[in-house]
Amino acid sequence: MTISRNHYLEQRGQRWYYVRRVPSRYRQVDLRRTIKKALQTDSVTVAREIRDRMMDADEHFWETALAEKTGVSAQESLEICRYRSARRRAVAVGFDFKPFPTLVDKEPVETLVERVNALKEDGAKLIDVEAVLGTIEPPRDTIRDAFKLYCDKLSIGETSRKSPEQIERWKSSKRRAVEHFVVLCGNLHMDEIARQHGRQFYDWWGERLRPSSETDHTYRPNSANRELGNLRLLFREYWTYQGDEDRENPFRKLRFKDTPIESTPSFSDDWVRSKILNPDALKGINDEAQLIAYALIETGCRPSEIANLQPENICLDADVPHIRIRPAAKRELKSASSSRDIPLIGVSLEAMKRAPNGFPRYREKGNSLSAALLKTFHTRGLMESKKHCIYSFRHAYEKRMLEAGLDYGLRCTLMGHKNTRPQYGDGGSLEYRRKELLKIAHPLSGKFVQSLANLSA
């Protein structure tokens, strides 16, 4: 191996330049792709000293700018700063940073000798020794510390388009896995978590999955796999960020065999027409919750998609009245295929006529909406069985389209599902979509339409 102490340095003629690509994770705060600066010296020793200062300055700028953009404090402990400085220094003197135990246990002896010999040059400083030989102790964050770091910094790309409500739900799922681990194994430092702890967590979930007559609650392998996957991801991302991406993951390949998830039952047509479209069925709850429930019936939308409709995406004056399901600057959809246009027919058209500006009471308040609808449907006997839920409207919509013979591609488009067939065109005009959907529309009585007269959002 040829030792180079001139990383990020280029010589042009007799002069030295600092040349460095901006890391991809900082592109959102630094629009430069490559940094090029003349160092105004022909001395390689002076160039290295200036280069070191510039490296530190760039790293500090990126971290601070990213923190300001995301609203996260850039303050970190001296231990972490010193550790990251050593990693940068190792690169500057021509080596990848590797912890000393890794060099001793997993690298050829020649590698260690090579690093020791390199330190003899130019009278190495303490930071050079710590960097090249990896003797500096890594920061000792606990798993809770690591989870905070992951949420604040390491997942920025994943959460940048989510709404505050979506971020909280996203965090909640992952936080649950961390807290289960802490209860079981303790709030261990990340460098203490070993395979034995991964097995302990796996075995604990195994006991929860075992059928028992002592509890009515049945856990599914899918829930266990989700938590194992969240811990596996946290461990990998944390150590990659710390520069130790080769560390063995204690949760690797720990997984239970998936079981099919029992599908949500759909509301029958008779139930919807006799129970839910009864003029007095939802009378008494707030107007917006009623209108959202009615809007779900003939659109097949997810409740959050209706609750978060923006006024510009409610197109009542169009030749074909319709709603547009679209992501927002701070709210993402479940998937790319969820973006779609749905003609308004029947009860959903009547509901949206009374909510031309959407539903401000429930915008970004999905939990409040779910609580209001679930309480009403359960207390008034509007659930067809114990297994039915508000999502049963969506399943009923899909079933009705299937039984009416609507084209598979059109059904995928209207449901916001990915079409497994090759797709040609745009899925059909709004006129075509409305014509097909009218085949499944529930009939409305004049008494029911009259009952909507005083509702508004």
Image: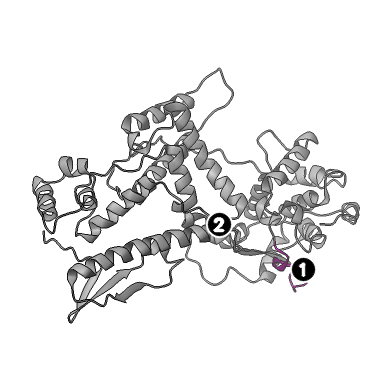
Crowding at mark 2 (Cα within 10 Å: few <14, some 14-19, many 20+) = some
x 32%, y 33%: residue: 194
Q: Looking at the image, can residue 419 be seen? A: no
Q: Which residue position is annotated with label 1? A: 316
Residue 192 visible in the picture: yes
Q: Position of residue 123 (x, y in %)?
A: 14, 55
**Residue 4 versus residue 255: which sits nearer the camera?**
4
Residue 407, image x, y percentages? 59, 61
Q: Look at the picture and state if 236 lies above or below 313.
A: above
Q: How would you rate the neighbour count of disc 1 (Cα within 10 Å): few for under 14, some for 14-19, many for 20 or more?
A: some
> Which type of secondary structure does the marked residue at label 2 adopt?
loop
Residue type pointed to by label 1: Leu
Instruction: Give the quarter of the image for residue 321.
Output: bottom right
Which is more foreground, mark 1 or mark 2? 1
Residue ranking furthest to the top: 214
Observer-nearest residue: 256 or 76?
A: 76
| Residue 373 falls inside the magenta stretch | no
Name the residue carrying label 2. Answer: 417
Residue 320: within the magenta?
Answer: yes
Residue extent of the magenta highlight? 310-321
Identify the image quadrant of residue 145: top left
188 horizontally vs 92: left or right = right
Nearer to me, 294 or 332:
332
First reached walking from the N terminus: tag 1 or tag 2: 1
Determine whether, in the image, residue 50 is placed left or right of residue 230. Answer: left
Q: Is residue 40 left or right of residue 436?
A: left
